[in-house]
Image: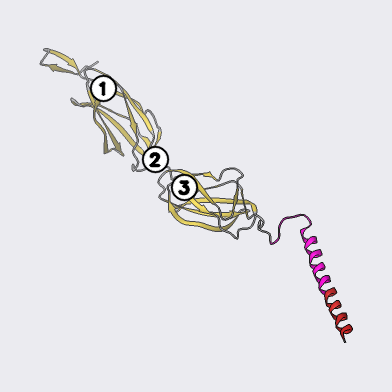
Amino acid sequence: EIFYKRWNATSGTWTPDGLITITNPSGFVSWETGTNHSISWTSTGSITNVKIELYISGVFDSVITSSTLNDGELLWIIPFGLANSSQYQIKITDVSNPTTYDSTNYFEVYTPLGLITITNPSGLVSWETGTNHSITWISIGSITNVKIELYISGTFDSVITSSTLNDGELLWTIPFGLANSSQYQIKITDVSNPTTYDSTDYFEIYTPPDSVSSSPSIPGYDLLLLIGISSLIAIFLIRKQLMKNNFKTFF
């Protein structure tokens, strides 16, 4: 068994070279951008600080950290913008001795195409035409703008907006003229990738009956009005007949 040693001029002794062994990622793993993962390793020998780098297809990509304490672990937030690939490797090197290092096997880093989840309307809600309501959603992945559409009974009805910023909310004034139905749905789609979308469950849109009546809501009002009009007509006819009789008597 061969041990490589370095001469330590301070102590006047031979010191074994260090050894680094990466324990995570180990084997083929798949890590998503934007998520946190622990890079872990073990070491022997006198290693104070290590450098951690990222490679893709055997070519240097970026420095994860230029120097961190050799404590066996680093929490890494995988940055957005990395190309999707299953040919990534991590390399950990002794800062003081670049010949002491270890590299992982290949592993995957990926960014999902995107995911949209509508949060409002949720469940069976009932919205009245002419009122304002917030359409809300959450998303992951690289989605810049979304399109929002209205469906009824599974059939396209209208475009609420052809493109709006993917900021998670749109205030919608429900237009008059929509048919009363409990079979409405809202669909939100990534403008750049129509295969990324979400649709709500059914909800209701309605226009209430006209609450303004041309007559007071008094029981029997129409009948009373008819009787009143009839009485006025009768009085008018009687007075006319009396005037006619008086005219004949006078002559």
Query: What is the x, y in percent for residue 167?
Result: 42, 47
Q: State if disc 1 and disc 2 touch (CB < 8 Å).
A: no
- The crowd level at tag 3 (other Cα within 10 Å; few <14, some 14-19, many 20+) is some
Which residue was labeled with disc 3? 169
Which is more N-terminal, label 3 or label 2?
2
Q: Which of the two residues, 23 or 112, is positioned nearer the viewer here?
A: 112
Asked if the residues shown at circle 2 and circle 3 are in contact, with their CB atoms under 8 angstroms apart, the answer is no
Q: Nearer the viewer, residue 46 or 71?
A: 71
Q: Circle 3 — which element?
A: strand
- Which callout, 2 or 1, points at the residue further toward the start of the chain? 1
For the stretch drawn in magenta, the main secondary structure is helix
- 19 inside magenta stretch: no
On the image, which quarter does residue 33 sit in? top left
What colouring does the structure picture have? secondary structure
Left/right placement of residue 228 relative to residue 82 reads right
Q: Residues within 10 Å of mark 2 (few under 14, many from 20)?
A: some
Q: Nearer the viewer, mark 1 or mark 3?
A: 3
Secondary structure beneath dot 1 equals loop
Q: Quadrant of residue 239?
A: bottom right
- The residue wearing badge 2 is 110
Tell me residue 221's x, y (percent): 77, 58
Badge 2 element: strand
Please state the horizontal and vertical placement of residue 72, each as a whole percent of the image: 30, 22
Q: Which quarter of the figure has residue 49?
A: top left
Q: Earlier in the sequence, mark 1 or mark 3?
A: 1
Spatial separation of the CA atoms under disc 2 and disc 1: 28 Å
Instruction: Quickly name the residue at label 1.
Output: 70
- Viewer-proximal residue, 216 or 152? 216
Three-letter amino acid code at disc 2? Tyr
- Identified by mark 1, the residue type is Asn
Q: Which residues are magenta?
A: 214-236
